Image: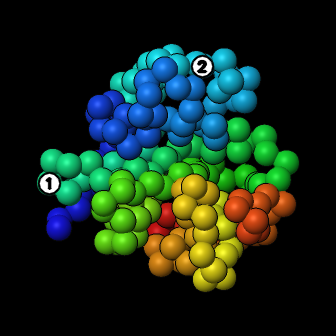
Amino acid sequence: MSITIRPAHDFDDVATMLGPKNPTSSVCFCLSHRIPAKLNQSLVGPERGEFVRELCARDVAPGVLAHDGDTVVGWAAVAPRSELPFARSTKIPHVDDQPAWSIWCIRVRPGHRKKGIARTLIPGAVDYAASQGAPVVEGYPVDNRGEKVDLTMAHVGTRALFEAAGFTMAAPTEATSAGFPRVIMRKDLRG
């Protein structure tokens, strides 16, 4: 297996990773933490996919995709925090005034899990953020202390996963996911 990480400009690959099985469903596409709640709720069915198609067409991709050859096997959302609802979050505080980028969703396709793809996605997302001028990258994973995390809530990642990618704990938060506290993990990209 040879994993490559690419900016997520290919909508079909993004849809493979994030789109609902039923295209008329009003779920996912990794929008709940990307756009304001009112807009997220207003996008129904195929409108969600069209919104993401437009994101993929922008100069700055909405995240990165992991490929095993030509097969898409993973996704990591990464974007400037200032463009996300996290910018106004009362539960996940700002650590400082640096224009941080955020990684908030990591997914590995069924059948490809437990092969280290998530451990490749996070550095790939960091590299992409760095290529776009990010001085620091944050993640908001659960601090599960090695306990099992429900798969439906595992998309935020774990503290250990971010530590393995060179991030350090920057601050606690008031947020939780799957019953675990979330923490702010950071990686400074300024040499």
Q: Looking at the picture, does residue 7 appear above or below residue 186?
A: above
Specify the farthest residue to the bottom: 146
The spot of residue 166 in percent (x, y) is 49, 76
Q: Looking at the picture, does residue 163 appear above or below residue 66?
A: below
Q: Looking at the picture, does residue 153 appear above or below residue 86?
A: below
Task: Give how far apart the Cα atoms at labels 1 and 2 are.
Answer: 33 Å
Does residue 61 show up? no
As shown in the figure, which amino acid type bears the numbered disc 1? Answer: Gly
Q: Residue at x 36, y 56 (%)?
A: 110
Q: Please, what secondary structure does the residue beneath circle 2 have? A: loop
Which residue position holds label 1?
69
The spot of residue 149 in percent (x, y) is 61, 69
Q: Residues within 10 Å of mark 1 (few under 14, many from 20)?
A: few
| Quarter of the image that includes the N terminus | bottom left
- Looking at the image, residue 184 sits to the left or right of residue 11; the answer is right
Specify the farthest residue to the left: 69
Q: Nearer the viewer, residue 36 or 83?
A: 36
Q: Residue at x 37, y 72 (%)?
A: 114
Q: Residue at x 64, y 31 (%)?
A: 35
Q: Nearer the viewer, residue 153 or 125?
A: 153
Which residue position holds label 2?
43
Q: Looking at the picture, does residue 75 appear above or below residue 166?
A: above
